[in-house]
């Protein structure tokens, strides 16, 4: 299975299929085509088709891999449709990636990425409805990016215990991804009505883990088990598309299906304190302790069980520091533009000035930005695509990550160090996956949630990641893995 196939399935746990796929195949087997049905339990979500053929690229022999993905689901009561198309050219002689085009559409919005691969750098260009962003991504010394011409899990390497590392360009994050791959075992499976030996391959990355079942020669993928209980099953074209193209009934609400029971139902209200235990936390990088949420206990097993004590912070202008904050040291990253958070955009800077004006009090300026976003934005739950802040500003509708990205861009443009955080929010006895922001006020990192009508964030929010917009993809590691138990609370 190709590395972009793996990357696609890893990413789907965060944006629900917002990734790219392509098929590995040896030249002698070309052209070829594979179809997959995509399922949550026994409910079909959509399909994927992978096509590979020999082709020329700028006069040189190459392998062209095309993938098309179509999914339909329900998110917060709204029907969400996603369409993804990827085309990748790799050198026929070396499997080195040469060029990639990536197109993702959902909720009436489209993001495109065009990437050209040089010896030591990937030159990427992201295009949305509001313009384009360019980024040069250095290829680390000694790293060879893997294309799609050959499958490294084939031949003599397909032995239980065999392990290796792969690297590829990720158009979702505009970065170089590292994946650790291990062959766990060989088992019997059925393919096209025949019993075959299949290698069970586990792939681990910063985004998520998945298990692939493939033939020993690497030519055929039989099934993929992904987070959230999602499966990709090898099917005929008719089987893969039939339920989707005619009389398709979307599955139950995915926001509800992936939410975590709190262990008890609590009345609505603002929580001043919350003590809660999360089990199934995959690694310590998701365990964050700070002035707002204190980690009281960690129990280690195959996964982590963590007890948090969370308190809502009262804050006022009198406690706040003043602008400007020097863009140096630890604050430089959180004052800078980055993919999706275009703080240096003219449109973003102009809107930020209109909102915050000449105010120097950090807390006052941040409150005004949060209030403006809450009043101007409209919830649109069917937006299954990561959008840059300029697009959110122009088209003021979206989900929590859109609110958080726009807040980060406007606040950074005002000179306020801001980071995007992801985690859980408690509502009516369940924890839902959520995104919000934190700003540096001069003496503390203070939470702001632009989806809510108040400046104060109560104790219902549990933070699992902090950083930039692309850190939300790390949540693929935890979605569908957690259990929660509320131990105590105060309103």
Image (cartoon, rainbow, N blue to C red):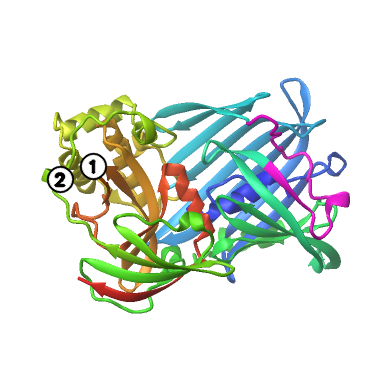
- Looking at marks 1 and 2 on the same chain, the residue that comes earlier in the sequence is marked by 2
Do tag 1 and tag 2 residues touch (Cβ < 8 Å)?
yes
Q: Which residue is mark 1?
A: 441
Which of 295 and 394 lies nearest the eye of the viewer? Answer: 295
- Please state, as top left, top right, bottom left or bottom right, where the C terminus lies in the image: bottom left
Q: Which residue is mark 2?
A: 319
Which of 239 and 378 lies nearest the eye of the viewer? Answer: 378
Q: Is residue 399 visible?
A: no
Q: Is residue 412 visible?
A: yes
x 79%, y 58%: residue:
161
Q: Whole-percent x and y of residue 189?
A: 80, 68
Q: Whole-percent x and y of residue 55?
A: 76, 31
365 displayed left or right of 201: left
x 24%, y 32%: residue:
414
x 66%, y 40%: residue:
167
Q: Residues under labels 1 and 2: Cα distance?
A: 8 Å
Q: Say which element carries label 2.
A: helix
Q: Whole-percent x and y of residue 313?
A: 22, 57
Which of 194 and 108 lies nearest the eye of the viewer? Answer: 194
Magenta stretch containing residue 145, yes or no?
Answer: yes
Q: Whole-percent x and y of residue 65?
A: 70, 39
- Mark 1 Cα-neighbour bin, 10 Å: few <14, some 14–19, many ≥20: many
Depicted 186 relative to depicted 207: above or below: below
Task: Classify residue 361 by image quadrant.
Answer: top left
């Amino acid at each position: 299975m190709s590395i972009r196939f793996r990357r696609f399935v890893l990413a789907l746990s965060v944006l629900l299929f917002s990734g790219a796929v392509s098929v590995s195949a040896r030249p002698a087997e070309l052209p070829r085509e594979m179809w997959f049905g995509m399922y949550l339990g026994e409910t079909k979500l959509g399909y994927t088709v992978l096509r590979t053929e020999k082709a020329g690229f700028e006069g040189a022999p190459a392998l062209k891999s095309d993938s098309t993905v179509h999914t339909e689901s329900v998110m917060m009561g709204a029907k969400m449709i996603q369409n993804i198309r990827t085309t990748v050219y790799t050198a026929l002689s070396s499997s080195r990636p040469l060029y990639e085009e990536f197109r993702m559409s959902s909720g009436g919005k489209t993001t495109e990425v065009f990437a050209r691969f040089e010896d030591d750098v990937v030159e990427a260009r992201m295009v949305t409805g509001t313009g384009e962003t360019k980024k040069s991504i250095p290829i680390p010394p000694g790293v060879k990016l893997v294309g799609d011409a050959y499958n490294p899990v084939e031949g003599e390497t397909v032995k239980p215990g065999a392990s290796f590392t792969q690297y590829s360009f990720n158009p979702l994050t505009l970065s170089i991804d590292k994946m650790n791959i291990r062959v766990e075992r060989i088992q019997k499976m059925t393919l096209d009505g025949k019993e075959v030996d299949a290698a069970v391959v586990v792939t681990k990355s910063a985004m998520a883990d998945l298990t692939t079942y493939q033939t020993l020669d690497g030519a055929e993928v039989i099934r993929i088990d992904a987070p959230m209980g999602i499966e990709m099953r090898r099917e005929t074209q008719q089987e893969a598309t039939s339920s989707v193209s005619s009389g398709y009934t979307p599955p139950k609400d995915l926001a509800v299906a992936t939410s975590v029971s709190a262990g008890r139902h609590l009345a609505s209200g603002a929580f001043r304190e919350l003590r809660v235990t999360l089990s199934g936390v995959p690694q310590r990088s998701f365990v964050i302790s700070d002035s707002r949420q204190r980690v009281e206990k960690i129990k280690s097993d195959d996964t982590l069980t963590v007890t948090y004590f969370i308190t809502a912070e009262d804050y006022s202008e009198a406690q706040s520091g003043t602008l400007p904050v020097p863009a140096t040291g630890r604050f430089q990253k959180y004052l800078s533009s980055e993919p999706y958070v275009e703080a240096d955009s003219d449109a973003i800077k102009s809107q930020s000035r209109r909102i915050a004006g000449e105010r120097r009090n950090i807390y006052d300026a941040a409150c005004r930005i949060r209030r403006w976003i809450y009043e101007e934005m409209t919830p649109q739950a069917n937006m299954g695509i990561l959008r840059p802040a300029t697009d959110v500003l122009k088209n003021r509708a979206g989900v929590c990550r859109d609110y958080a990205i726009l807040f980060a861009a406007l606040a950074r443009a005002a000179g306020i160090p801001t980071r995007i955080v992801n985690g859980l929010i408690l509502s009516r006895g369940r924890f839902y996956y959520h995104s919000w922001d934190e700003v540096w006020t001069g003496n503390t990192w203070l939470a702001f949630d632009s989806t809510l009508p108040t400046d104060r964030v109560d104790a219902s929010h549990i933070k699992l990641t902090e950083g930039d917009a692309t850190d939300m993809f790390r949540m693929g590691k935890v979605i569908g893995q957690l259990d929660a138990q509320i131990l105590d609370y105060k309103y």
